[in-house]
């Protein structure tokens, strides 16, 4: 993976935008509108304070300032800001939660290399949470 592009904001779902689909990207995704589907990102996924995401997220780093209804799988870390709400499970080697967060789900702290094969775009593995739980 070329690390030069993972911190470049190359995809934005802006405030007032409603989007449904499956996103697979290199770089940084920022969601300030309404999104439903799934996200697979080699970089960061940012859910802004006006963002609402009903999806599963697979990324290196996930920062939640809005609402996520679905499971989050992070290779490096998950940060939930004080304005954030997560209604779903989190699997990550590192977690930061600010005071005031609303979280309803299960938390699993993992080894940092556990999701390397899931982020491989050539991998034939599916993104089933059941497969991940059976490791």
Image (cartoon, rainbow, N blue to C red):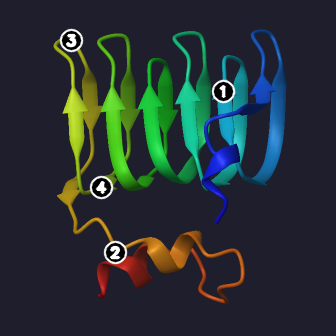
What kind of element bears circle 1? strand
Q: Residues within 10 Å of mark 2 (few under 14, many from 20)?
A: some
Asked whether disc 4 touches disc 2, contact meaning CB atoms under 8 Å apart, the reply is: no
Asked if labels 4 and 1 touch by Cβ distance under 8 angstroms, the answer is no
> What residue is shown with label 4?
92
Q: Residue at x 38, y 37 (%)?
A: 87
Q: Nearer the viewer, mark 3 or mark 1?
A: 1
How many marks overall?
4
Give the structural element (helix, strand or loop) at label 2.
loop
- Residue carrying label 1: 30
Q: Which residue is mark 3?
A: 100
User: Separation of disc 2 and disc 1 at Cα?
Assistant: 25 Å
Where residue 10 sits in the image (x, y, percent)?
A: 79, 34
Q: Earlier in the sequence, mark 4 or mark 2?
A: 4
Up/down of 89 relative to 87, above or below: below
From mark 4 to mark 3, how far is it between C-alphas? 20 Å
**Mark 2 / mark 1, whichever is N-terminal:** 1
**Side (left or right) of 37 relative to 21:** left
Numbered tag placed on residue 114 in the rendering: 2
Q: Nearer the viewer, mark 2 or mark 3?
A: 2
Q: Residue at x 22, y 65 (%)?
A: 110
State which tag comes first along the sequence, 1 or 4: 1
For label 3, the SS is: loop
- Quadrant showing the N terminus: bottom right
Label 4 Cα crowd, 10 Å radius (few <14 / some 14-19 / many 20+):
many
Q: Secondary structure at mark 4?
A: strand
């Amino acid at each position: 993976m070329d690390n030069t592009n993972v911190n470049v904001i190359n995809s934005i779902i802006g405030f007032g935008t409603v989007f449904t689909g499956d996103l697979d990207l290199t770089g940084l995704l920022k969601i300030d509108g309404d999104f439903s589907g799934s996200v697979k990102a080699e970089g960061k996924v940012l859910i802004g304070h006006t963002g609402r995401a009903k999806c599963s997220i697979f990324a290196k780093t996930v920062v939640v300032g809005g609402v996520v209804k679905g499971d989050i799988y992070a290779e490096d870390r998950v940060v939930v800001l004080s304005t954030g709400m997560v209604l779903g499970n989190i699997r990550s080697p590192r977690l930061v939660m600010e005071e005031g967060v609303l979280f309803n789900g299960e938390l699993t702290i993992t080894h940092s290399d556990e999701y390397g094969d899931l982020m491989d775009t050539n991998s034939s593995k599916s993104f089933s949470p059941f497969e991940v739980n059976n490791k």
